[in-house]
Image: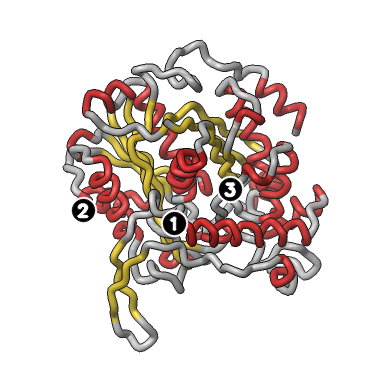
């Protein structure tokens, strides 16, 4: 893997283009004007269990419009990442945009790069802006794992291809088993995984207590039905999977979830969740012309392939490519938002990269508050930018592993 990464990286030297350079402001920079998310709630149990994905997404879209004060008619295109809905969630996304107040002239599409779908949507919009195809766009993501997660979400696959190509067959390995493969192959102990998971909850609990999520979460009114069928309206404004007081000792009592002899448990893996997020992007000159606040700048991104059987290692190989492409060193990055699909792969990635754990997910991650698949990539940006500002830092990286064997990463600068 390492030698192949070096071969890839050697052809990815920083561009000579002046735009989107760290530390240099250009009218052609692709900037972020708003990045917001819903709270993330537990699938089938939490505040959004009776809310459809387009309803969550519409509320987040409205939040972006209200916060930025942008005329919705100026938004040319919207890309929405999602993974599980039938039809790629295309109808749901269009309904959400129209309901939120975007006119019929604002186009929309959906994208599925599995766990990086939300980030892919943002990068797709940023790239279209860079190329001059659109002026203003939104990259977003949404997932209701309550409504769409389960056996029905698995499409039939070809036995002929799986039987004749071992790597293709590995794409069918359940995610939990790929986590066990990473732990076994790279010696990530159960103790390390549980310690990492407990730290995720502790950081998220502290962030909730201190109000550090308030700048990124849009409160949403949702209807909840109880066991007796009685409906009530609640305001969902808090990630409900965070468990204060979680310790490694408590997590160590949980049984392995995928392999009796394994180390991955319900406590050191990401939670099944519902949520949405959206990021409003345009060129700096456009934001300045419209008098809109600039909260951050998109620098660059990278996607790499890794062996499907250990798909969780993706961030360890995507992050260096993106960081090098940005003209930076790993040590230049102030905060890393690395998705906690499983503690095994997150721990491996952090240790492989050689970055301090204190730079990783300072407000907790998916183990504590969940991983609504298509939304996470956009959610990380909504989490990253306020934290960079709060901490007085400048450079942030978001990254995640991707089912079937990939990793994606992107670099952002706070303003």
Say above or below: 7 vs 394.
above
Disc number placed over residue 293 in the picture, else none: none
- Is the C-beta separation of discs 2 and 3 under 8 Å? no
Residue under label 1: 211
Q: Nearer the viewer, residue 4 or 333?
A: 333
Label 3: which secondary element: loop
Q: Say few, some or many: other residues with alpha carbon within 10 Å of mark 1 (under 14 / 14 to 19 / 20 or more).
A: few
**Distance from the alpha carbon under mark 1 to that under mark 3:** 16 Å
Residue under label 3: 361
Residue 330 in sight here: yes
Q: Earlier in the sequence, mark 1 or mark 3?
A: 1
Q: Earlier in the sequence, mark 1 or mark 2?
A: 2
Quarter of the rendering occupied by the C terminus: top left
Say above or below: 253 vs 342.
below
Residue under label 2: 99
In this view, the mark in front (1 or 3): 1
């Amino acid at each position: 893997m390492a030698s192949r990464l070096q071969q890839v990286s050697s052809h990815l030297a920083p561009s000579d283009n002046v735009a989107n350079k760290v530390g240099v402001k250009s009218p052609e920079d692709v900037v972020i004007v708003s990045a917001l998310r819903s709270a993330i709630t537990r699938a089938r149990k939490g505040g959004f269990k009776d809310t459809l994905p387009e309803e969550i997404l519409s509320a987040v879209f409205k939040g972006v419009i209200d916060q930025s004060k942008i005329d919705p008619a100026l938004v040319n295109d919207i890309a929405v990442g999602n993974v599980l809905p039938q039809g790629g969630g295309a109808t749901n996304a269009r309904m959400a945009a129209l309901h939120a107040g975007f006119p019929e002239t604002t186009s929309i599409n959906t994208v599925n790069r599995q766990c990086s779908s939300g980030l892919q949507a943002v990068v797709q919009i940023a790239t279209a802006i860079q190329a001059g195809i659109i002026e203003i766009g939104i990259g977003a993501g949404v997932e209701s794992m309550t409504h769409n997660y389960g056996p029905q979400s698995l499409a039939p696959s070809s036995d002929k291809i799986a039987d004749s190509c071992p790597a293709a067959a590995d794409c069918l390995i359940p995610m939990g088993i790929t986590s066990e493969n990473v732990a076994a192959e790279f010696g990530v102990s159960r103790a390390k995984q549980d310690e990492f998971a407990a730290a995720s909850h502790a950081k998220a609990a502290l962030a909730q207590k201190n109000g550090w999520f308030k700048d990124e979460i849009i409160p949403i009114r949702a209807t909840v039905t109880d066991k007796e069928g009685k409906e009530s309206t609640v305001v969902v404004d808090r990630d409900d999977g965070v468990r204060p007081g979680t310790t490694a000792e408590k997590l160590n009592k949980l049984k392995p979830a995928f392999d009796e002899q394994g180390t991955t448990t319900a406590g050191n893996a990401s939670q099944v969740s519902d949520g949405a997020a959206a990021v409003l992007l345009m060129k700096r000159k456009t934001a300045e012309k419209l008098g809109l606040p600039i909260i951050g700048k998109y620098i660059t991104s990278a996607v790499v392939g890794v062996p499907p059987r250990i798909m969780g290692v993706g961030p360890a190989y995507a992050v260096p490519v993106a960081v090098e492409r940005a003209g930076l060193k790993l040590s230049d990055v102030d905060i890393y938002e690395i998705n906690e699909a499983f503690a095994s792969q997150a721990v491996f990635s952090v240790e492989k990269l050689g970055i301090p754990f204190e730079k990783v997910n300072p407000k907790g991650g998916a183990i504590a508050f969940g991983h609504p698949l298509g939304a996470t990539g956009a959610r990380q940006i909504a989490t990253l930018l306020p934290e960079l500002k709060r901490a007085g830092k400048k450079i942030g990286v978001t990254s995640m592993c991707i089912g079937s064997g990939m990793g994606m990463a992107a670099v952002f600068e706070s303003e």
